[in-house]
Image: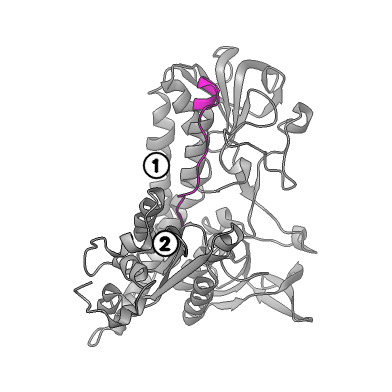
Amino acid sequence: MSHNSSEGRDHYDVIVIGAGSAGFSAAITAAEANASVALIGWGLIGGTCVNIGCVPSKVMIRAAEALHGARAAGRFSGLSGKARINDWSALMADKDNLVETLRNKKYIDLLSDYESVDYIEGRVVLTPGGVMIGERFVRADRTIIATGASPAIPDTQGLPETPYLDSTAALELGALPESLLVMGGGYIGCELAQMFARAGTRVTLVTRSQLLPEAEPEISAALTQYLADENITVRTGLDYISARKTEAGVALVISVGGSQETLEAQHLLLTTGRRPNTADLGLSEMGIQMHANGAIKVDEHMRTSVGGIYAAGDVTGQDQFVYMAAYGAKIAARNAMNGDSISYDNAAMPWVVFTDPQVAGVGLSEAQAIKAGHLVKTSIALLDQVPRALAAHDTRGLIKLVADADTDVLLGAQILAPEGSDSIQTMVMALKFGMTAKALGETLFPYLTTVEGLKLAAQGFGKDVSKLSCCAG
């Protein structure tokens, strides 16, 4: 099997462009259907998640949680705790070691298991009937574009000349910054702001809207307060005016309510969204339609506007989660092989933000449900109603359920809780199988768990959960 661009065939059943999670998912799916596949990569094999995204960030977030957990021991009578970073470079090496292990196990080593997949490294331009890799023409009847996305840089005066970090560079810093200014209050900004603050950095988080604009407003407001409680300065509802380099680091001029002020820090971290990697692929020359932000337009079968060409993952701009990239790519590959019969379905798609407390959701928010034409009812259970949280002496958080008022069918859920990420899957199953709030409230849940809060929230549609006996349900 060939692993470079000098060998290999010049004709394949399927060409997959991009060797991240979506590309690997598409290539493996096609190979399992007995197709010959050219998997074309550029840069680090494995893509965003394993190399610069989910995996390294979660190691650092868990490390910061360990620091916080020791320091927060005083919430129990008779306890106190201290924790500190002894060796920042050792922590970074630990993270890099896991990244390398997973990159090898889950990506590089897998290639040898699939003899019909040729991995080719090089820059690609689409062309009728196939692709050009440098000077080499490779033909295929079907092509799947899975080139991912990269950090987007806002159009702020002076920013291109100002030294800044993106999330990748932030996770590779040689030393812990003394102070950090985080631009952007989406999930990456919130996660990294809290991680650095817990590690000992003075953090200011600024955003044009509120934190986690996709989240329920009650959850966004509560999380804002929890971050402020950890001495993170959170500034919302502002405009970015200009940025510049200073002797001590960087300065950002913001405008709040018509008046300008200057914020300064050692480093500026941009977490202002991601843009699809579609430049220089020759898409417009091929007539492939794109959205205004450069994302490739696809239908529910993952087809682009040009026959035989599919796209999946972050390059399509939708559902930018690693498991959705892999899922969409699998559909693209199956449709490419077997005639476009499978549709992409994200109705029960969970999402998680690894702040502490974690934020997790599935289905429709209250605003989305109203917009979709439902007559809506909601139930909110604060975590101080959940026995698990009382026992943990940590009642930060809430659970919000959304249901159809006419049918009682559950439409969505969002959880803000220390173990919210593991609790949301119960709601995924409930939505997948069309459960009503009444049925969820009558389901058996184990006692003294975070997930039991879902039962309490479901019962909260009909009664005041604070009046229930705690173990009787």
The answer to whether residue 216 is left or right of residue 461 is right
- Image quarter hosting the N terminus: top left
Span shown in magenta: 334-351
Residue located beneath label 2 in the image: 408
Residue matched to label 1:
102
Name the foreground residue: 186 vs 169: 186
Q: Are marks 2 and 1 in contact (CB under 8 Å)?
A: no
351 up-or-down from 2: above or below: below
Q: Nearer the viewer, residue 199 or 354?
A: 354
Give the main secondary structure of the magenta stretch: loop
Residue type, numbered disc 2: Asp
Q: Is residue 371 left or right of residue 172?
A: right
Q: Of helix, strand and loop, which one carries label 1?
A: helix
Q: Whole-percent x and y of residue 451? A: 31, 64
Residue displayed at 56% across by 74% down: 203
Q: Is residue 383 above or below residue 189?
A: below
Amino acid marked by disc 1: Leu
Q: Is residue 337 magenta?
A: yes
The answer to whether residue 370 is seen in the rendering is yes
